[in-house]
């Protein structure tokens, strides 16, 4: 994904704020971030690492909130490339019953593909290029304009999806003139849509009037004294239209006062958002009074954003903005929002001074109280139910990237250094203890024994990291490839270097070591969700890639090379070549680094082994002595042959960590 010629890049503070928004767990924050990213791209700005952002957007295509999926597709149309087309076509198929998400998918598809390929994809998906599909196709593409010029969207009997999409085209200034009627100009027709019975059609008509630089409040043909009869989603855009520029805002000052007192927080958010770049003498009286009286935090945040951006115009704004900045946590959305708003003002330097001063205080406090620990860390660790063990630093980093909180903790008479973290969502949290063991069964056993002695409440021990895969090109459904995920199923853990040596040969004496029944149930639930086109680990993977960067991204497909007897082997066709597949199967473990394809295939055929690693039996033995459950999750990084290398290790570590978080979050909160 190469930058466009003469592209202007997003300011780093703006980019950081957008990334925090789209990475937040609140669907509304995600939507705002995606909308903001799309608008910045339409203004000719570009992220410095669009491929990384595109990976995250693909993860959001599996979000539970329809509006997040829709805006992720809208953003992909601008940020993405042909590498993202497969994820988009899958999203189209999953969401065919949602006309708005379907339209966003069609729009993204047509934006990223050459016209003939786009036509073929739409034909393959049984989506004729007419009606709403045609309107969606031209949103971000110059193609299909000839068909659109002869099409008409008749206001009186067109269906709602067509009218919504027509409004979007008007807002983006991509609608051919007389789209609605040969006798009526678009700027006249758009005013009729605000009275449509479908509230989303009405909302889009107001949004279009606000977004199109050639349209004004007059084109809306809606008397301001009638606005209070409209639903909140329409009122919020009318308020934004009333502050489209300084002159319009001054002319409608009394209307702004009414908007600040609107009973709907959604509508007030619209007005506060519209005020972000607007200032004139006297406006501060309204804003300051409004801030003092406002109860909704999301409205206050937008008002503070306006104040931070306009602090050089009004000295009274500086104090409240800086107070809010100082009260917010380092790295929080609030700080990122205020920094992005103030980046071209003198207030930005004041914010940086607060940040640096706070860091200095923290450093001083650490020097004075070197033995201090964050409040509550030991208490949370003492109640944790899940212990995650990794062997390599890259595996540990991958798991940390999936955690929402991380704190270090040591225990008396225990040589392990622990990370106490948590998986946090909107309704609950699951505390996790993470420890790094080093390579081999003995190290895994030692670290696990110490951890279970120090934290007796642990019930589930999960080994997470990379492994060699056991491919089976003759059976496509069992063909494990690089970047795939393997977990220990009922087939269990096989210690294949625990052998009996006789004249007749070597015989593996390892008995079956079955994994945690509870975690198998959670894995079964995830498998069920996958059949319903839900892959929660993909969203987690996308979050992790944003944190860890390009060194953990998926390597190119041409590096996934399988050989047999010195010859290249063609992988069987699959519908998921560019995303991880999940396999349950036996895990082979030994204190031997396996680089022998014949041994690999023997293990696969005799024991149904899908992945080979070096720690699980040590962990299993330690857990067995404490009557604890064990589970193994591995990302596949090589094929256990003489050609093994490190190319896929980072990505494989991250996919294993992502699946592990999805697994833990699938467990009922009552188990915690």
Image (cartoon, helix red, strand yellow):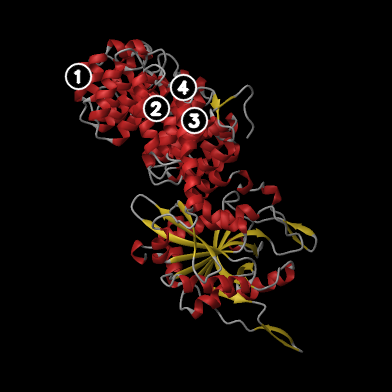
**SS assignment at label 2:** helix
Look at the numbered disc 3 and give the secondary structure of its residue: helix
Quarter of the image with the C terminus is bottom left
User: Distance between the Cα atoms at labels 3 and 2?
Assistant: 29 Å
How far apart marks 2 and 4 lie (CA) works out to 38 Å
Q: Tell me: residue 234, above or below residue 461.
A: above
Camera-nearest label, 3 or 1: 3
Q: What distance separates the C-alpha of mark 1 from that of mark 2?
A: 25 Å
Residue 222 rendering spot, x and y as whole percentages: 25, 16
Position of residue 130 in the picture relative to residue 605 (left or right): left
Residue ID for mark 4:
345
Classify 10 Å Cα crowding around label 4: few (below 14), some (14-19), many (20 and above): some
Mark 1 vs 2, N-terminal side:
2
Marks 2/4 in contact by CB < 8 Å: the verdict is no
Query: Which of 655/562 is in front?
Result: 655
Q: Which residue is mark 3?
A: 14
Q: Nearer the viewer, mark 1 or mark 2?
A: 1
Q: Reading the chain from its start, which is encountered first: label 4 or label 3?
A: 3
Above or below — where is 502 with respect to 486? below
Residue 548 visible (yes or no): yes
Q: Is residue 414 left or right of residue 522?
A: right
CB of mark 4 within 8 Å of CB of mark 1? no
Toward the front, the furthest residue is 368
Of the numbered discs 3 and 2, the one sitting upstream in the chain is 3
SS state under label 4 = loop
Question: Of the residues tagged 3 and 2, which is closer to the observer?
Answer: 3
Q: CA distance from mark 4 to mark 1?
A: 38 Å
Q: Earlier in the sequence, mark 3 or mark 1?
A: 3
Q: Which residue is mark 1?
A: 226
How crowded pointer 2 is (Cα within 10 Å; few <14, some 14-19, many 20+) is rated as many
């Amino acid at each position: 994904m190469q930058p466009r010629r003469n592209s202007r890049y997003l300011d780093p503070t703006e980019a950081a704020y957008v990334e925090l928004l789209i990475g937040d767990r609140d669907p509304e924050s995600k939507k705002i971030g995606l909308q903001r990213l799309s608008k910045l791209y339409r203004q000719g700005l570009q992220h410095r690492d669009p491929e990384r952002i595109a990976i995250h957007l693909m993860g959001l295509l599996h979000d539970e909130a329809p509006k997040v999926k829709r805006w992720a597709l809208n953003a992909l149309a601008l940020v993405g490339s042909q590498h993202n087309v497969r994820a988009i076509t899958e999203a189209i198929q999953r969401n065919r019953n949602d006309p708005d998400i379907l339209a966003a998918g069609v729009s993204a598809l047509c934006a990223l593909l050459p016209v003939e390929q786009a036509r073929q994809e739409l034909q393959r998906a049984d989506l004729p290029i007419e009606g709403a599909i045609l309107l969606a196709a031209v949103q971000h593409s110059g193609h299909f304009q000839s068909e659109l010029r002869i099409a008409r969207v008749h206001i009186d009997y067109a269906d709602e999806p067509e009218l919504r999409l027509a409004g979007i085209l008007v807002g983006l200034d991509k609608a051919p003139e007389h789209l609605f009627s040969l006798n009526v100009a678009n700027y006249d027709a758009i005013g009729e849509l605000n009275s449509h019975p479908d509230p989303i059609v009405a909302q889009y008509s107001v949004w279009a009037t606000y977004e199109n630089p050639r349209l004004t409040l007059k084109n809306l043909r809606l008397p301001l004294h009638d606005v209070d009869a409209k639903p909140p989603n329409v009122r919020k855009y009318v308020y934004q239209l009333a502050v489209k520029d300084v002159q319009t805002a001054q002319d409608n000052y009394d209307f702004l006062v009414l908007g600040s007192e609107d009973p709907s927080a959604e509508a007030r958010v619209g007005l506060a958002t519209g005020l972000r770049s607007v200032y004139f003498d006297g406006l501060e009286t309204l804003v300051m009074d409004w801030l003092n009286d406002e109860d909704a935090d999301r409205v206050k945040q937008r008002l503070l954003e306006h104040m931070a951006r306009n602090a050089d115009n009004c000295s009274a704004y500086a104090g409240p903005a800086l107070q809010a900045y100082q009260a917010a946590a380092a790295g929080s959305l609030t700080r990122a929002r205020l920094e992005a708003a103030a980046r071209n003002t003198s207030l930005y330097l004041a914010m940086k001074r607060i940040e640096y001063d706070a860091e200095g205080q923290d450093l001083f406090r650490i020097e004075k109280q070197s033995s201090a620990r964050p409040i509550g860390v030991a208490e949370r660790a003492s109640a944790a139910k899940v212990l995650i063990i990794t062997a390599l630093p890259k595996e540990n980093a991958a798991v940390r990237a999936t955690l929402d909180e991380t704190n270090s903790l040591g225990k008396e008479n225990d040589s392990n250094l622990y990370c106490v973290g948590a998986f946090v969502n909107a309704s609950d949290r699951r505390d996790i203890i993470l420890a790094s063991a080093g390579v081999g069964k003995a190290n895994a056993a030692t670290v696990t024994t110490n951890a279970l002695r120090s934290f007796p409440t642990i019930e589930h021990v999960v080994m997470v990291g990379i492994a060699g895969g056991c491919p089976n090109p003759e059976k496509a459904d069992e063909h494990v490839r690089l970047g795939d995920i393997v977990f220990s199923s009922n087939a269990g853990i096989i210690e294949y270097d625990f052998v009996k040596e006789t004249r007749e040969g070597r015989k593996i004496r390892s008995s079956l070591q079955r994994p945690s029944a509870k975690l198998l149930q959670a894995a079964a639930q995830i498998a069920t969700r996958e059949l319903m086109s839900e892959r929660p680990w993909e969203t987690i993977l996308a979050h992790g890639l944003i944190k860890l960067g390009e060194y953990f991204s998926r390597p190119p497909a041409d590096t996934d090379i399988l050989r047999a007897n010195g010859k290249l082997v063609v992988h069987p066709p699959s519908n998921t070549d560019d995303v991880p597949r999940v396999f349950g199967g036996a895990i082979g473990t030994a204190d031997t680094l396996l680089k022998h394809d014949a041994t690999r295939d023997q293990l696969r055929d005799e024991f149904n082994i899908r992945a080979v690693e070096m720690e699980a039996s040590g962990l299993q033995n330690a857990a067995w002595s404490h009557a604890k459950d064990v589970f193994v999750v591995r990302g596949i990084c090589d094929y256990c042959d003489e050609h093994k290398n490190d190319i896929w290790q980072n990505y494989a570590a991250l996919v294993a960590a992502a699946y592990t978080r999805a697994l833990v979050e699938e467990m009922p909160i009552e188990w915690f």
